Image (cartoon, rainbow, N blue to C red):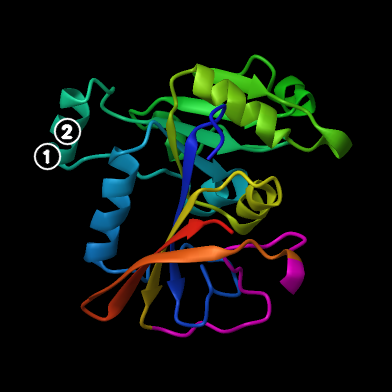
């Protein structure tokens, strides 16, 4: 991990054939309560949670920390009750009626200058951060440098695949947690953890397996990115 950005961890549940949702991109609710607890633990350890606008459109809400023990751990660590929930969208084309905007969490928007202008003076976000790169894409390196200056030292990335692809392309991911769930979704249009341009085999980011754990019918895989 570079010293000028937060530590970043992808956390995802996938089907046995590597899908994060079905072909209709329906909300994925196929993981177990054990996986949900694991996800909440990862979020509770983070200072910020990143997810794309597509993910927000699918669910309408975000996952906040509710477990009393995890809330106490955050308090003891000198953290606010909830990490910053950061919606990533270059266009900021987000419906303000989503229930997300009524949840008791810090809401941030990470966008481009075009997105900032599009959102305008609407309420809903506590912070709006705009970083424009080529072709009106988000400048991820500059954005993460800024997040670090705002005391966000650990980030959890929850998808979707386009967001994760962008961050992998920019070499901005440190860890990956995958929960493999016991079902097969199939479908050529069903999304995978990494969409976007993808990688050739020679340029694919190498992973180092840190741990494998079976809990019930699910398998928890922990990887670090590295040569």
Residue 196 in picture, x, y percent from top left: 73, 59
Tell me the residue at 68%/62% (across/down): 195
Task: Please say if 190 is above or below 227.
Answer: below
Q: Which residue is mark 1?
A: 69
Range of magenta residues: 183-202
**Count of marks placed on residues:** 2
Secondary structure of residue under mark 1: helix
Q: Which mark is residue 97?
A: none
**Is residue 59 magenta-colored?**
no
Task: Please say if 130 is above or below 211.
Answer: above
Question: Mark 2–mark 1 contact, CB under 8 Å?
Answer: yes
Characterize the local packing of mark 2: few (<14), some (14-19) or many (20 or more) Cα atoms within 10 angstroms.
some
Secondary structure of residue under mark 2: helix
Q: Main secondary structure of the magenta part?
A: loop
Spot the residue most to the right.
135
Q: Which residue is mark 2?
A: 73
Which quarter shows the C terminus? bottom right
Residue 15 in picture, x, y percent from top left: 45, 77
Q: How far apart are labels 2 and 1 at the CA level?
A: 6 Å
Characterize the local packing of mark 1: few (<14), some (14-19) or many (20 or more) Cα atoms within 10 angstroms.
few
């Amino acid at each position: 991990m570079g010293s000028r950005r937060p530590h970043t961890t992808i956390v995802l549940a996938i089907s046995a054939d590597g899908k994060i949702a079905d072909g209709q991109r329906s909300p994925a609710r196929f993981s177990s309560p054990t996986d949900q607890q694991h996800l909440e633990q990862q979020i509770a350890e983070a200072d910020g949670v990143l997810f794309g606008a597509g993910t927000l459109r699918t669910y309408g809400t975000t996952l906040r920390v509710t477990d009393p023990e995890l809330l106490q751990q955050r308090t003891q660590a000198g953290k606010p009750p909830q990490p910053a929930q950061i919606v990533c969208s270059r266009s900021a084309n987000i419906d303000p009626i989503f229930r997300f905007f009524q949840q008791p969490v810090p809401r941030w928007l990470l966008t481009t200058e075009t997105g900032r202008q599009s959102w305008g003076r609407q309420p809903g976000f506590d912070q709006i951060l705009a970083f424009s790169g080529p072709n009106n894409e988000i400048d991820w390196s500059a954005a993460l440098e800024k997040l670090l200056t705002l005391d966000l030292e650990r980030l959890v990335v929850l998808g979707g695949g386009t967001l994760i692809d962008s961050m992998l392309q920019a070499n901005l991911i440190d860890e990956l947690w995958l929960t493999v769930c016991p079902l097969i979704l199939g479908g050529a249009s069903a999304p995978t953890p990494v969409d976007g341009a993808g990688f050739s085999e020679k340029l694919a980011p190498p992973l180092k397996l840190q741990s494998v754990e079976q809990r019930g019918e699910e398998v928890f895989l922990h990887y670090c990115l590295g040569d």
